[in-house]
Amino acid sequence: MDSKYSELLKSKMNAKSYEKLTALRNDKIVDFVGLFAEHCNPASIYVCDDSKEDEEYIKAQALELGEEFKLAKNGQTIHWDGYGDQARDKVNTKYMVYKENLEKMKSLNSVEYEAGKEEIMGISKNIMAGKPAVVKFFCEGPAFSEFTIPCVQFTDSWYVAHSEAILYRPAYEHFKSMKDNDENFFKFIHSAGELDERGCTKNLDKRRIYMDKQNNIVYSMNAQYAGNSVGLKKHSMRLAINKAGQEGWLCEHMFLMACLNEEAGRKTYFAGAYPSACGKTSTAMIPGEQIVGDDIAYFRNIDGEFRGVNVEQGIFGIIKDVNAEDDPVIFANLMREQELIFSNVLRGPDNQPYWLGSGLDTPKKGDNHSGPDWFEGKTDAAGNKIPVAHGNSRYTMRLDYLENYDKEGFEAKKGVKVDGILYGGRDSDTCVPVEESASWEAGILIKACTLESETTSATLGKEGVRNPSPMANMDFVSYPLGEYTMNNIAFGKSVANPPKVFSTNYFLRTKEGKFCTDKLAKKVWLHWAEGRIHGEYEALDTPTGKIPLYEDLKVLFKKYLDLDYTLSEYTYQFTFRCTKWIEKLQRSIAYFKKMDANCPSTIFEAWEKEI
Ligand code: SPV
Ligand code: MN
């Protein structure tokens, strides 16, 4: 191999790493690693293949370098992000956009390409000085499949590499099988930057996540929270949404699950998009069903069918309120001696993790995201009381630990055939608990595009404010919303039998302000949808779709929850609320106009017809 970086790389790598890198026969990879080896200037670079040995080395390094700490239970570790690095940084996450496209990308957070490049290269110059870096190969979706997107991650954070080893499929062997100098892969360059004594990023004012979708590379600097640093998660997702739009497939912010109907001997796959705090994970984890993935899915037309895969192999899940009662499967797994990373939770004096809503007998002091000396009542610089753990603390866990994991669906190289899509919003007074769309197109326009969430007491600010959240994907849609919507419609129409589309709303309230249905009612709505897919139930037409008949729900409530569902409950819950619906449509129209000045008129026409 002959590269201008050969000598430099040899000076920073041991012979084995250099051999692993060059064995891929890909100058594009060598140039990427070489460029940032020179520019970010790490002390050394370790190149991983898919071996157990390299995975163990990553874990050992994360501990050795103080990015993770061992907890009492074998295999469990804890990691803290800085106090100001506890969630995705939307302000400093930008698309680098060529001048001629700036106008088109106006409503997305963008920076002019050259200016952005200069800024990020300035920030990243020598940023890894003195630190050992690691290069690892992963892929999105199953390897060696039509879905596979190979990715290379170059980082100086061994916590990031460790997280990715749990969350993504290894792909060194996949890279090896690619043709020489193949350019079809995503590149992620990340540095946590200078660290403090707890291993947390110091220079948060220089945190930048810049995305170059033209060249499929994402730069993440001075960031550690996984949503800001783990290239394969939301950075890759934005690149994939862009690529999918160009190539005619879909990348969605969706779970994938199997609904089991044992009596009928059926296994029916559903995908679902829910804005944050609208029941996404709990729907993917409905007791008695099976999970394929909890966050991101790719869909392709394979042999004329709508087929999907989980992009990931693990869960980076919110740990708040995971307890034995509400989330028994995940909770039991968090209690086991197995490989788990807890982030931003409390480490008690017993060296065990504790979090908000755990149901555990929680100590009143310990180390948490605010420092090693947390105690109940501790306040931050602004005088706010610091809770035992951050509300966005997380666990990182392999999916195959879960008892309800659908191995067959997860491993399928052609993905699973998806027959139902759920779009679940949060609104207290408008949408019915479950409703089927008249068609695929209506599903996208009337259900997906009008999705909203309502602020709750758990978020800052006023309660009950409605936030538009088309497809629950607005943080990641990386090109204009109208075009994305049209691509979504076109994709569904490209297959012979697109999935049936349903809306759910678990948050409708009674006149007294109480939730109308129990958390467990999700199972009933899901099984009604499953029955509709298989032609089992009649439905009533409404201006927005098709709703269940009372008799069918009554049977389903009895069967699955042993509850007597009354006619008066049904009548209240399934009333069509015309004025509220028109208000919702008007908010959607205003939002689409704001987000995309060139939004195709067909989208508005469909809504205006409703009004
Ligand atoms: C989300 O916020 O949608 C997540 C977590 O899944 S993050 O990795 O921060 O994106
Ligand atoms: Mn997500």
Image (spheres, helix red, strand yellow):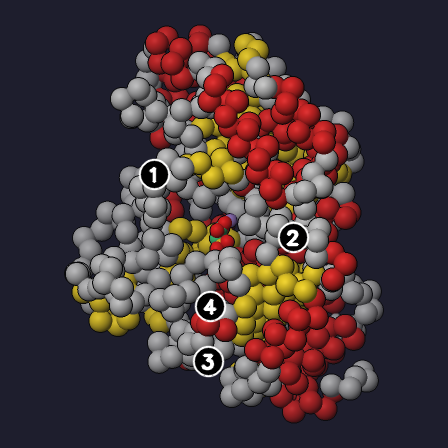
The residue at the point 64 percent across, 83 percent down is: 39
Label 2, on which residue? 106
The mark nearer the N terminus, 4 or 2, is 2
Amino acid beneath label 4: Gln
> Residue 73 appears at what percent x and percent y?
31, 63
The residues bearing labels 3 and 4 have C-alpha atoms spaced at a distance of 11 Å
The residues bearing labels 4 and 2 have C-alpha atoms spaced at a distance of 28 Å
Quick one: 184 or 439, which is closer to the camera? 439
Other residues around mark 2 within 10 Å, as few (<14) / some (14–19) / many (≥20)? some
The mark nearer the N terminus, 4 or 1, is 4
Quick one: 234 or 561, which is closer to the camera? 234
Amino acid beneath label 3: Glu
Amino acid beneath label 1: Glu
Q: Quadrant of the C terminus?
A: top right
Residue mark closest to the camera, 2 vs 3: 2
Label 3, on which residue? 194
The mark nearer the N terminus, 1 or 3, is 3
The residue at the point 26 percent across, 68 percent down is: 381
